[in-house]
Amino acid sequence: MRTVKSIAAMQRLALKWKRSGVKIGFVPTMGYLHAGHISLVTEARKRVGPKGKVVLSIYVNPTQFGPKEDFSKYPRDLQRDTTLCHAGGVDIIFAPTDTDMYPRPEGYAYSTYVLEETLSQAMEGASRPTHFRGVTTIVSKLFNIVLPDVAIFGAKDWQQATIIQRMVRDLNFPLKIVVAQTHREADGLAMSSRNKYLNPEERTQATILWRAIQTAKAEVKASKAPLAAARLKQKLAKLIASQPAARLDYIEFFVPDALTTATKISRGTHMALAVFFGNTRLIDNARL
Ligand code: PAF
């Protein structure tokens, strides 16, 4: 395994592989890896086989953070990540720098962005207005550099994965997107690099996201008729408010691929929620 920092070197390597018919599996990340990321690596390996190459990118992308968000304090530890990647079977870590990804030489500043205009409006897009512009831009750049045959995204960021799928379709990127299952701690909390910010009390209370999902699932299972979304939302908001450290950002029920709001909930409706614990914002989602 080796780490490549230069964009040109990564692109050259990917082109060489492509010319000799080697399949490339790609896992884009912002680093501070956990078992969830490694499960995406395992999925990538499964897709490209033992002769293929698995590339994992580590880049904390500034354009997907709002001005008041945690860009500067987002956890970074390349050494620790390198050990995990080595053990997880990654072939190449691609870890570019900010100045290479968004150059600002004199007389020229980075000025091209990729914008998805429909799926990115609600939920995360409503709470973080410039977030998805940053995500679609960086993911496009990474696809053009790594040239993957298959790229793996985690289902925890359901809206992100759906937008990327749409972008790939709309802009004709020649690759397959795979959405892999959310990895959870034993108590149900979805694995996330941001869990590191939680103090012990917040960490205990953070299971409320998973418990809210379980409650919604149980309600759907128990009901013979479709449920009114507004009433269920109210019930779940109350449950979340029972945790003193929790502050609800949103709960949404929606049609999984179109991401359109569902006012009636039945089996197969998707639920997503975002909850703050202090300054830490956690998200989760599931099919009900
Ligand atoms: O999901 C993430 O970690 C990021 O949004 C991604 C896809 C690596 C783009 O920066």
Image (spheres, rainbow, N blue to C red):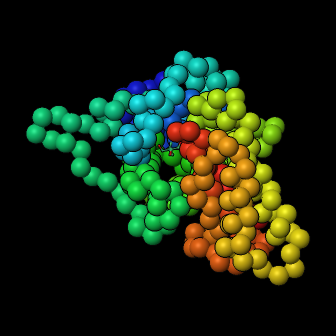
Against 282, residue 165 (above or below) is: below
In the rendered structure, the answer to whether residue 207 lies left or right of residue 136 reads: right
Q: Is residue 166 above or below residue 261?
A: above
- Residue 190 position by quadrant: top right
Quadrant of the image occupied by residue 232:
bottom right
The image shows residue 152 at horizontal and vertical percentages of 60, 47
Q: Nearest the camera: 72 or 176?
A: 72
For residue 40, side relative to residue 146 (left or right): right
Q: Identify the residue at horizontal 25%, vertical 36% (top origin).
A: 103
Give the residue displayed 77% in from the left and 63% down from the top: 216
Look at 63% across and 61% down and name the residue there: 251
Residue 272 in picture, x, y percent from top left:
64, 59
Give residue 191's position: percent from left, percent from top: 68, 39
The percent position of residue 200, horizontal first and vertical second, equals 70, 29
Identify which residue, 198 or 115, lies in the foreground.
Answer: 198
Query: Residue 23 is drawn in which quadrant?
Result: top right
Residue situated in front as seen by the camera: 267 or 8: 267
Visible residue check, residue 174: no
